[in-house]
Amino acid sequence: MTVFGTPYFTSRNAAISYYKSQGYEDATADVDAKLAAGEIHLGYPPGVPLEDLIHLDGGRRWGIVHKAA
């Protein structure tokens, strides 16, 4: 099994919390800029079945689980 991180966050507040934990001084402004630029997104990754998703980073970000065949 392999887990791939995504740029999809469970909410705006989750993204702000994540970037604060990464050392961003003004995480709110940085998240808003990243959202506007399309660098990060809110909600589920499109086209991925829910059973293939996992919460990462304390439930703030979505990951995709790839199960080897």
Image (cartoon, grey):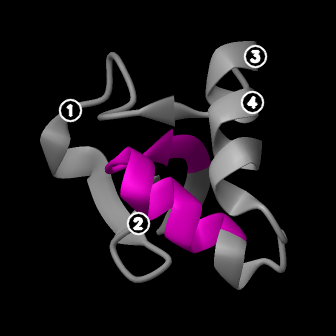
Q: Residue 61: x percent and y percent?
A: 45, 59
Q: CA distance from mark 2 to mark 4?
A: 18 Å
Q: Specify the segment rendered in magenta.
A: 6-19
Q: Amino acid at mark 3?
A: Ala
- Residue that extends furthest to the left in the rendered view of this protein: 51
Residue that carries the numbered disc 4 in the rendered image: 33
Q: Which residue is mark 2?
A: 60
Image point (40%, 66%), residue name: 60
Residue 50 relative to residue 54: left or right: left
Circles 3 and 2, Cβ within 8 Å, touching? The answer is: no
Q: Is residue 24 left or right of residue 53?
A: right
Q: Are marks 4 and 3 in contact (CB under 8 Å)?
A: yes
In the picture provided, is 55 more to the left or to the right than 49? Answer: right
Crowdedness of circle 3 by 10 Å Cα count: few (<14), some, many (20+)?
few
Is 50 within the magenta? no
State which mark lies toward you, 3 or 2.
3
Estimate the x, y position of residue 29 in percent, counting from the top left. Answer: 71, 45
**Which circle's residue, 2 or 1, is located before the other in the chain?**
1
For mark 1, what is the residue? 49
Disc 4 crowd rating (10 Å Cα; few below 14, some 14-19, many 20+) is few
* Tags 4 and 1 touching, CB below 8 Å: no
Asked whether residue 8 is drawn in magenta, I would say yes
Residue hosting label 3: 37
